[in-house]
Amino acid sequence: MNKPECFVEFMIGHVLFGLRGNYKDDQDVQVAEYIDQAMDCIDKGFFQGAIQHLEGALEVCEREDVYNVMGIVYFFMGENEKSFECFDKALDDPTYWEAYYNVALWFHRSQMNERALEIFDEIIEVGKDLRGGILEGAYNNKACMLVEEDRYEEAIELLNSVLLLNNKRVESLVNLGNIYYKQNKLQEAKKYYEKALLVNSKCPSAYIGLGVVAFENGELEKARNLFDKSLSISNLSVVAKKNKQLLGEYN
């Protein structure tokens, strides 16, 4: 049997909650309490409960960050229309870049890549004055989209731009490893997967990458153990399961 090609897992940046601080009055304090309860529900995967708390917050005050978080919850639930409506309401404040970034993720999920790229480009053009990882996320996510078009060198340049801003951005370290793997530069790929694990020892995508490198180097048992390690952290990884299946069929 010919040696199969394993799969790697590109990491799109996470949604941005963009919560507003500076609580000025009793209304803000009440909204903050509802948001805290909603965030606790989100952490536990109780999305409907989160929506109820956020609806309570909106009854107190219709704030953009509440709509943004509600859009994220609907995004997680796969309710795309409701998600977009909430992000759109959050953008009543045109300077609320976290919501704009989340809209780009929405377009990417909806396979409207051209529109998503336009937004990421706008964010990149605004530059370093943006809050909390927005620029890093735009660089990272645009790079992932360029990889889909085999534009590897442009993607590498964008990911290096991320690491100049934050050399501990795990998604970008893993994505650089993935690109070097696709270019058959296995030592470079391994270096970036290992860097990612130094930042976050529980990154399943990095273990998948190391497993793929081990497989290409003929270290089949090591590859199997690394795919198992990935699945022990997140048993939902379709990529790790597919690679284990390919490994079993090959060996």
Image: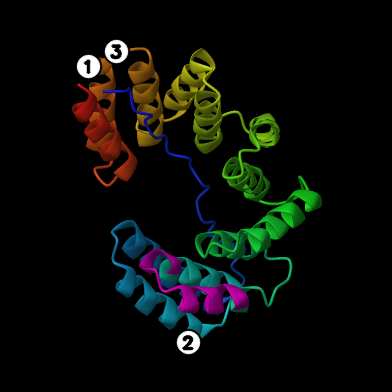
Give the residue at mark 3: 219
Give the residue at mark 1: 221
The mark nearer the N terminus, 3 or 2, is 2
Q: Tell me which segment is drawn in magenta.
A: 75-88
The mark nearer the N terminus, 2 or 1, is 2
Q: CA distance from mark 1 to mark 3?
A: 6 Å
Question: Which residue lies at the image location 34% right of the left edge and 57% below the top edge?
Answer: 43
User: In the rendered structure, does residue 160 fall within the stretch colored magenta?
Assistant: no
- For badge 1, the amino acid type reads Glu
Residue 13: percent from the left, percent from the top?
53, 47
Number of numbered labels in the structure image: 3
Residue 34: percent from the left, percent from the top?
42, 72
Residue 249: percent from the left, percent from the top?
20, 29
Badge 1 element: helix
User: For mark 2, does the 10 Å Cα neighbourhood hold few (<14), some (14 to 19), or many (20 or more) residues?
Assistant: few
Dot 1 and dot 3 residues touching (CB under 8 Å): yes
Dot 2 and dot 1 residues touching (CB under 8 Å): no
Image quadrant in which you'd find residue 227 = top left
Give the residue at mark 2: 59
Question: Which residue lies at the image location 51% right of the left edge and 22% below the top edge?
Answer: 192
